[in-house]
Image: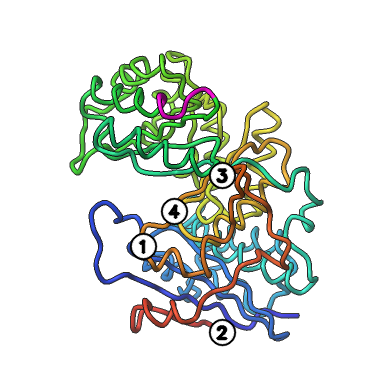
């Protein structure tokens, strides 16, 4: 079997509110083969930037677009192709968007391999250590304590045993922040874990005063309500700040959705002293690199709980990762904020049962398929491409 083409599909919703600007667009990667098997991946990043990295022509052996790097290759050679893409993009890659673009291709290659062998991905990773884990509801923090109470109570009634409240109005007034978290804890009770995602970019404007000292003020104000973790509270390069916060609060610290490649995760763990690592399989280097990160975390006695915000594909792919590693405890379960994200892969990908458990899919490959009607509805004319 040989790779014959790499296709990028750029999608965008026509109207976007500020509250859901993280779901306004998407880029889907399809890798085609001469056997008629097509693999699908996605990248949760700027579609136009990712497309350029994939489509770029060869300029130099270490400065070549990713599609040109893998066309004609055997899609089963995933580890070798990962390394080939990494080396071919050294001049413009090694971190950031190039690793993100590699992620989408890597996901598609694993999807091809699973489909060709008739096996779900977790079986290709050595089988399942666990076929189900608790899902945590991942939602924006409401504006008022009453609304926060109601939101947590709503998810608790659905059977969820954990919830993460993030971004929204937090980061401006410590007393109000504490009241929001207190209301969430009151609704959650003792049987439901409560996670807090502060976001390192609070508010609509750049706040240059947001630093480890202010994060610690926030953390100490919410410590009495026993949050399970505090997430993404500083820019990812502020490793000294991460370490200060980790040393100054009793709350576990979590981060990783903004890290690309295992070397950034090594810094986050060994210099930033985070308690929990959160690779995003659509950004960190795909499932290939996410598994490496997971075992680096396991070597340090740290949980690996993937970030999984966008579509049904990332949830399904993340669940294959979770099933096959020894240090995963939860699946992030975010409701897509636009119909495009909700329906792009035929729904949420992973369903959660009445006990709040998410189960790994048993279908071949990642286990979800692209809905062509959604592609037709939201595709940006002239923005997609096929190299091959």
Which circle's residue, 4 or 2, is located before the other in the chain? Answer: 4
| Residue at 76 percent of width and 74 percent of height | 116
Q: Which residues are magenta?
A: 185-190
Numbered marks: total: 4
| Residue at 66 percent of width and 68 percent of height | 109
Check if mark 4's residue and mark 3's residue have beta carbons within 8 Å. Answer: no
Which circle's residue, 1 or 2, is located before the other in the chain? Answer: 1
Within-10-Å neighbours for mark 1: few <14, some 14–19, many 20+: many
> Residue placed farthest to the front in the image?
157
Residue 388, compared with residue 246, is above or below; it is: below
Residue 274, compared with residue 107, is above or below; it is: above
Mark 4 and mark 2: span between their CA atoms?
35 Å
Which circle's residue, 3 or 1, is located before the other in the chain? Answer: 3
Q: Position of residue 339 (x, y in %)?
A: 38, 66
Q: Which mark is residue 335?
A: 4
If the image is split into quadrants, where does the C terminus sit? bottom right
Viewer-closest of 209 and 28: 28
Question: What residue is pinned by disc 1?
Answer: 338
Question: What residue is pinned by disc 2?
Answer: 388
| Residue at 41 percent of width and 79 percent of height | 384
172 relative to 283 in the view: left or right: left
Which circle's residue, 3 or 2, is located before the other in the chain? Answer: 3
Question: What residue is pinned by disc 3?
Answer: 306
Q: Which mark is residue 383?
A: none
Within-10-Å neighbours for mark 4: few <14, some 14–19, many 20+: some
Residue 135, compared with residue 40, is above or below; it is: above
134 relative to 120 in the view: left or right: left
Q: Position of residue 198 (x, y in %)?
A: 35, 33
Check if mark 3's residue and mark 1's residue have beta carbons within 8 Å. Answer: no
Q: Position of residue 343 (x, y in %)?
A: 46, 69
């Amino acid at each position: 079997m040989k790779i014959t083409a790499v296709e990028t599909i750029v999608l965008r919703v026509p109207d976007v509110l500020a509250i859901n600007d993280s779901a306004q667009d998407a880029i889907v990667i399809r890798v085609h083969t001469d056997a008629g098997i097509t693999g699908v991946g996605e990248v949760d990043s700027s579609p136009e930037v990712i497309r350029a990295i994939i489509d770029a022509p060869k300029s130099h052996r270490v400065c070549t677009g990713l599609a040109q790097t893998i066309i004609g290759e055997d899609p089963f050679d995933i580890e070798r192709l990962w390394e080939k893409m990494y080396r071919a993009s050294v001049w413009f890659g090694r971190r950031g968007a190039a690793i993100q673009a590699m992620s989408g291709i890597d996901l598609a290659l694993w999807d091809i391999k699973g489909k060709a062998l008739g096996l779900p991905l977790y079986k290709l990773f050595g089988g399942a250590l666990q076929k189900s884990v608790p899902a945590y509801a991942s939602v924006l923090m409401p504006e008022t304590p009453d609304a926060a109470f109601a939101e947590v109570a709503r998810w608790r009634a659905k059977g969820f045993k954990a919830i993460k409240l993030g971004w929204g109005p937090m980061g401006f007034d410590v007393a109000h922040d504490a009241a929001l978290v207190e209301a969430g804890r009151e609704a959650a009770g003792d049987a439901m874990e409560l996670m807090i995602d502060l976001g390192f970019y609070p508010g609509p404007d750049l706040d240059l005063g947001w630093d480890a000292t202010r994060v610690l003020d926030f953390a100490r104000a919410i410590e009495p309500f026993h949050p399970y973790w505090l997430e993404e509270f500083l820019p990812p390069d502020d490793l000294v700040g991460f370490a200060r916060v980790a040393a100054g609060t009793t709350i576990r610290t979590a981060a990783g959705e903004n890290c690309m490649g295992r070397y950034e995760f090594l810094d986050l763990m060994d210099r930033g002293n985070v308690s929990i690592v959160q690779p995003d399989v659509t950004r960190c280097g795909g499932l290939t690199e996410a598994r490496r990160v997971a075992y680096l975390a396991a070597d340090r006695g740290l949980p690996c709980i993937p970030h999984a915000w966008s579509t049904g594909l990332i949830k399904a792919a993340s669940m294959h990762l979770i099933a096959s590693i020894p240090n995963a405890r939860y699946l992030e379960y975010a409701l897509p904020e636009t119909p495009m994200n909700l329906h792009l892969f035929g729904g949420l990908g992973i369903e959660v049962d009445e006990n709040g458990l998410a189960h790994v899919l048993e279908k071949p490959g990642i286990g979800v398929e692209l809905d062509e009607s959604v592609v037709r509805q939201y595709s940006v004319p002239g923005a997609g491409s096929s190299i091959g």
